[in-house]
Each structure stands twice: as C-alpha cells, then as structure tokens.
C-alpha cells in the first residue's frame, strides 16, 4: 500500500514537529519516512508507528519524545485525521511516558496544531506559575522534568557557564619553589657548575598541588530518564572545565563512557555516550553495577583520592545486604562519596525504600539534583572541600527539598 498524498504531507509535518521537539532530524529524514511507509505499507496503527520509529528515532533517549509526539499528532482533531482513521484500525494506546511530553505539545502548538483533548473521565489540572516571580529565579528552581525543549537548551547553556569546582590537594611529588622548606640538592649542584663552583645558590622545593579526580556513577534507568541526560551535560561541562572526570552509566549493566564524553561538542559527546549504553531507560540493578565497578574499575580510577558522585534515586530492585556491602566498599575506596538524588525535590521525602536505607549510611553527603539551583549548590559544595585531610565520615540526614 502506498501512502496517500495527504498522509505523506502529514508525515513530513510530523517530522518537523519531532525536530522542533528536540530530535536531530534533517529534511532527508522526512523523505526517508515517506518512502519507508510507501515501501513497507501498513495495515494497523502499530505497524505505522514502528515504521516511522525505525526511520526517525536515532537515539535511545528519543523514544519517549517520539511516543508522545505520535500519540498527540496522529490523534488530533482536524480534518486530516479522518484519512488515517479510515486506513488504520484503532489499536490499544501505546504506554504513556511523561518524558518530553510538554516540549512535544509546545512544538505542535508552535506549528498551529492543537492536540486532541484527553477524555473527561480523568481531568488533570495543571497550574502554570510562570510570570509570578522573577524569570531567572523561577527558571533556576524549575524541575528538569517540567522543562520544554527551549528551556532544556537554555539549561544546557547555563550549565556550561557554572563555576565548577577547581579544588586542589597536596601531591606527593615535590616541585620547584623558591620559598620551599626543602633544599633541592641536585638542582643546587647543577646551578653551581655554571659558575665554576664559586657560587652556591641554594635551590628549594616544596609539596606540589594537583587536582583530584572525579568519578561519576550515573543511573540511566527509566525512573531517572528526566534527569540522566541533563546530568550528562553537567558531567561533560565538568570534564571540559576541570578535567580528570571518569563517567560510568548503569541501569542493568555498567558502561564506561569516559572516552565518549571527551568530545568537545556536547551533542556529539552525549550521542556517543547514549549509543554506548544499551540499557538506557531500562531497569535498575544498583548492587550488581556497583559490584562490577568495585571489581573492574575501582583501583584504576579511585587510586588518587577521587571524589565519587553517585547520581541515582536509589530505587533498587535487589537491595539487601549485597547493596550495603558494595556501597561500603565504594565508600572506603573513595576520598568522598556524594549521593545526588532527584527524589529530594519532594518536601516530604523519607528514606523508606529498602535500597535507599541500605545506601544511606555509606555516603558522606546527599544532595538534590533536579534543577539548576541544586547544581549550583553542588558546585559550591565541591569548591569548599578542604584538601588537608579527608572530611569526617558521618551518616548524612536528607536535606530539605528546595
């Protein structure tokens, strides 16, 4: 079955809506989608969905955006909907995912397309509080999960301009220092040879300073889908500004994406990282992922007093004593272990989940990571870390949500 002209025009408009919602699509992608529909044909709505998905979705993290756009675009109330409804029998609705849904709605509205309203049996009331306070203050406190495509782009720009930590700590290696307390005998003798041994100018050296490494363990499971991509932007900016950042992604397995994030282009770096992680938006096995890190990578990346950033909501499927044991080993190997948990955005957050209770005693600090204000607070906290001695390890109390 070849696509009707009206359907082909709607496929092109659908590709434009996806591009406006943040997907990386060029004009050739819309042409390929039309040709794919004409070649493969379709007899059900599900066939039509997966044909477009195979051509227009290039990255795992674009799945929720495509799903929301398909539901809103191809079920809207306008004259062209009758064409598709006559050709395709109504299939059960696809699973609804909130990630990217708002930016899809705004992209369709910008194109003059009004999505079909929801059934009246469940009425959702949404209050838009924009404009009631300073735009900068509201934007800094806005949850990443509630941002549209333009706001996500602006958040990326602000993350790149954050005052990231430039912490330094004493090194075992001695360096030249005119005011050092130790005499550098080798350099002193070499300098005296230049004057024929008649003058001896004492050369000195002192303890050098170096930047300790950062190690990030980022949860990319389905419950973290609204925050994992923004967290990757933050880690990429941290590596560009500060260097010595090792990044690992985990869901059902552990993936090292440190080399993928070395690209100076943030979009290329994140595309390479998402392509390397095959378990994006899947389940969460924190204990097995930490066990793989402690076994294969801990001695390589934590040998020089690294600070570990554990970015996860702690919603573990396994939990129990194994998770506590792996967290304790990670805690003892790191100079400082900071847990960044987006669940702290809720004022009434309590560590009731078994996985959270098992992890909490083995971290030095737990902070929120759901908006720009929380990221600024993290940068300030990292900058205040003293380098003279490791901080005291005391079980943290969950801070109040902002």
Image (spheres, grey):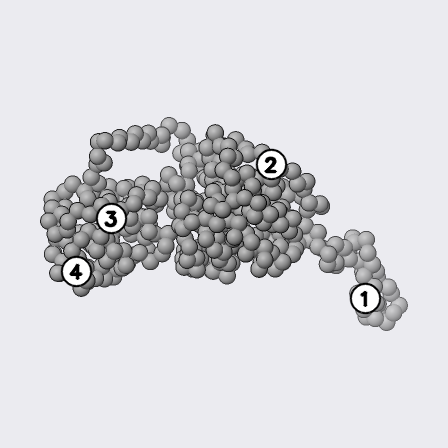
Disc 3 vs disc 1: Cβ atoms closer than 8 Å? no
In terms of sequence position, does the residue under pointer 4 or pointer 1 come before the other?
4
Residue indicated by mark 1: 186
Residue indicated by mark 2: 396
- What label sits on residue 70 in the rendered view? 3
Q: Residue at x 42, y 38 (%)?
A: 143
Residue 338 percent coordinates (x, y):
57, 43
Residue 198 percent coordinates (x, y):
89, 68
Q: CA distance from mark 2 to mark 1?
A: 49 Å
Decide if residue 264 is in sight here.
Answer: no
Q: Residue furthest top?
A: 132
Give the structural element (helix, strand or loop) at label 3.
helix
Disc 2 vs disc 1: Cβ atoms closer than 8 Å? no
Is label 4 or label 1 in front?
A: 4
Q: Residue furthest right?
A: 198
Q: Quadrant of the N terminus?
A: bottom left
Give the structural element (helix, strand or loop) at label 2.
loop
- What label sits on residue 201 in the rendered view? none
Residue 232 percent coordinates (x, y):
46, 50
- What label sits on residue 41 in the rendered view? 4
Q: Residue at x 31, y 48 (%)?
A: 65
Left or right: residue 25 versus residue 167 is: left
Nearest the viewer among 315 and 343 is 315
Q: CA distance from mark 4 to mark 1?
A: 80 Å
Disc 3 vs disc 4: Cβ atoms closer than 8 Å? no
Q: CA distance from mark 3 to mark 1?
A: 72 Å
Disc 2 vs disc 4: Cβ atoms closer than 8 Å? no
Nearest the viewer among 339 and 14 is 339
In terms of sequence position, does the residue under pointer 3 or pointer 1 come before the other?
3
Is label 2 or label 1 in front?
A: 2
In terms of sequence position, does the residue under pointer 2 or pointer 4 come before the other?
4
């Amino acid at each position: 079955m070849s696509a009707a002209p009206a359907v082909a025009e709607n496929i092109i408009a659908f590709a434009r809506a996806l591009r406006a919602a943040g997907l990386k699509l060029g004009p050739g992608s819309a042409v390929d989608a039309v040709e794919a529909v004409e070649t493969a044909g379709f007899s059900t709505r599900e066939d039509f969905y997966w044909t477009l998905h195979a051509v227009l979705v290039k990255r795992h993290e674009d799945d929720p955006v495509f799903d929301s756009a398909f539901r809103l675009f191809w079920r809207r109330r306008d004259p062209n909907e009758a064409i598709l409804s006559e050709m395709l029998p109504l299939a059960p609705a696809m699973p609804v995912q909130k990630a990217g849904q708002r930016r899809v709605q705004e992209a369709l509205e910008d194109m003059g397309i009004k999505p079909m309203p929801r059934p009246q049996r469940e009425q959702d009331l949404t209050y838009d509080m924009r404009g009631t306070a300073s735009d900068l203050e509201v934007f800094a406190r806005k949850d990443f999960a509630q941002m549209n495509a333009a706001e996500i782009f602006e958040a990326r720009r602000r993350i790149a301009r954050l005052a990231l930590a430039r912490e330094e700590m004493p090194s075992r290696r001695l360096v030249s220092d005119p005011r050092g307390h130790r005499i550098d005998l080798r350099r002193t003798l070499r300098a005296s040879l230049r004057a024929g041994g008649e003058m001896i100018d004492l050369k000195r050296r002192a303890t050098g300073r170096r930047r300790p490494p950062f190690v990030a363990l980022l949860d990319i499971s389905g419950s973290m889908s609204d925050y994992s991509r923004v967290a990757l932007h933050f880690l990429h900016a941290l590596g560009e500004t500060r260097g010595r950042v090792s990044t690992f992604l985990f869901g059902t397995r552990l993936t090292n994406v440190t080399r993928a994030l070395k690209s100076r282009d943030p979009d290329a770096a994140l595309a390479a990282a998402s392509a390397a992680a095959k378990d994006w938006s899947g389940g969460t096995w924190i204990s097995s992922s930490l066990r793989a890190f402690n076994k294969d990578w801990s001695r390589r990346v934590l040998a020089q007093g690294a600070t570990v950033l554990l970015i996860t909501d702690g919603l573990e499927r396994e939990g129990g004593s194994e998770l506590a044991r792996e967290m304790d080993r990670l805690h003892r190997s790191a100079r400082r272990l900071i847990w960044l948990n987006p669940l702290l955005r809720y004022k009434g957050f309590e560590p009731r989940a078994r996985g959270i209770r098992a992890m909490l005693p083995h971290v030095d600090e737990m902070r929120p990571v759901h908006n720009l204000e929380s990221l600024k607070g993290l940068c300030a906290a990292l900058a205040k870390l003293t380098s003279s001695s490791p901080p005291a390890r005391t079980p943290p109390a969950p801070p109040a949500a902002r």
